[in-house]
Each structure stands twice: as structure tokens, then as C-alpha cells.
Image: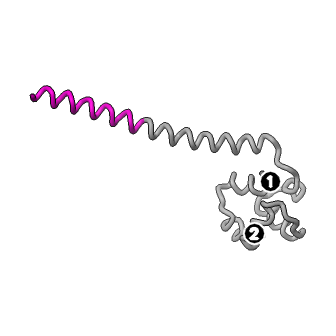
């Protein structure tokens, strides 16, 4: 994963949002994240928005940053799974109670 993409995703920005904030085109943001060569002005605009040095952006991502992104994705997925599980637990309770009430009336 590219450092620019990591910084962008940490801020919760889309490529379009980053393009607006930097004054660059979405295509340029895509090219930077893909690893294509871009000019110094592009790097300067990105560094200014992220409030880091150009050198920081050009360095390969640190393993901790990649790990934190993966951890965030896992936490998000886990929350979704828990919500679904809770729904089915509540549904099961509802069905059991209704079956008990229905049997009591018969």
C-alpha cells in the first residue's frame, strides 16, 4: 500500500476529496497512489494537506501504518458481524416467545 493512500484513508477521504483539497486532479491522485512518477509541485501539495514532509510521503509505508489500516478494517467488519449476530439472536428470541404464546393459547 502506498503512503499517500494510507494518509488519505486515515483521514477518511476519497480520491476526489483529496483532489479538491490539494487542487490536483483525481487522475493525478490515482497516479500517485499507483506509484507513477509525479512532479515536485504535486508532492508539495500533498505534503501540505497531510502536514508532513515530502520525504515522509515518498517513503514506503511503515509496517505499523499498514497494520493499523488492516486492524481498522477488521474492527469495522467485526462490528458489522456483531450487529448481524445480535439481530438473529433477537429474532430467535422473538420466534421462541411467539411459539410459546401460540402453544399456550391452543
Disc 1: which residue: 3
Region rendered in magenta = 86-106
Secondary structure found at label 2: helix
- Judging depth in this view, the residue of 104 and 68 nearest the camera is 104
Q: How far apart are marks 1 and 2 (CA)?
A: 16 Å
- Judging depth in this view, the residue of 18 and 27 nearest the camera is 27
- Judging depth in this view, the residue of 26 and 55 nearest the camera is 26
Quadrant of the frame with the C terminus:
top left
> In the rendered view, would you say 92 is above or below 68?
above
Q: Kindly indicate the quadrant of the structure image that contains residue 25.
A: bottom right
Q: Where is residue 39 shown, x and y percent of the image?
A: 89, 70
The chief SS type of the magenta part is helix
**Residue at (90%, 68%) from the top-left corner?**
40
Dot 1: few (<14), some (14–19), or many (≥20) neighbours within 10 Å?
Answer: many
**Residue at (53%, 40%) from the top-left corner?**
79
- Numbered tag placed on residue 95 in the rendering: none
> In the rendered view, would you say 10 is above or below 84?
below
Q: Where is residue 46 shown, x and y percent of the image?
A: 80, 64
In the image, is residue 7 part of the stretch drawn in magenta? no
Dot 2: few (<14), some (14–19), or many (≥20) neighbours within 10 Å?
Answer: some
Disc 2: which residue: 22
**Residue at (78%, 70%) from the top-left corner?**
28
Q: Where is residue 18 shown, x and y percent of the image?
A: 71, 65
Of callouts 1 and 2, the N-terminal one: 1
Amino acid at each position: 500500500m502506498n503512503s499517500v493512500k494510507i494518509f488519505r484513508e486515515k483521514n477518511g477521504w476519497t480520491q476526489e476529496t483529496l483532489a479538491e483539497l490539494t487542487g490536483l486532479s483525481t487522475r493525478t491522485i490515482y497516479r500517485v497512489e499507483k506509484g507513477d512518477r509525479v512532479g515536485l509541485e504535486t508532492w508539495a501539495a500533498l505534503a501540505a494537506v497531510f502536514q508532513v514532509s515530502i520525504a515522509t510521503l515518498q517513503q514506503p509505508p511503515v509496517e505499523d501504518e499498514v497494520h493499523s489500516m488492516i486492524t481498522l478494517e477488521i474492527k469495522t467488519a467485526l462490528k458489522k458481524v456483531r450487529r448481524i449476530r445480535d439481530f438473529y439472536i433477537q429474532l430467535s428470541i422473538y420466534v421462541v416467545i411467539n411459539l410459546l404464546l401460540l402453544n399456550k393459547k391452543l
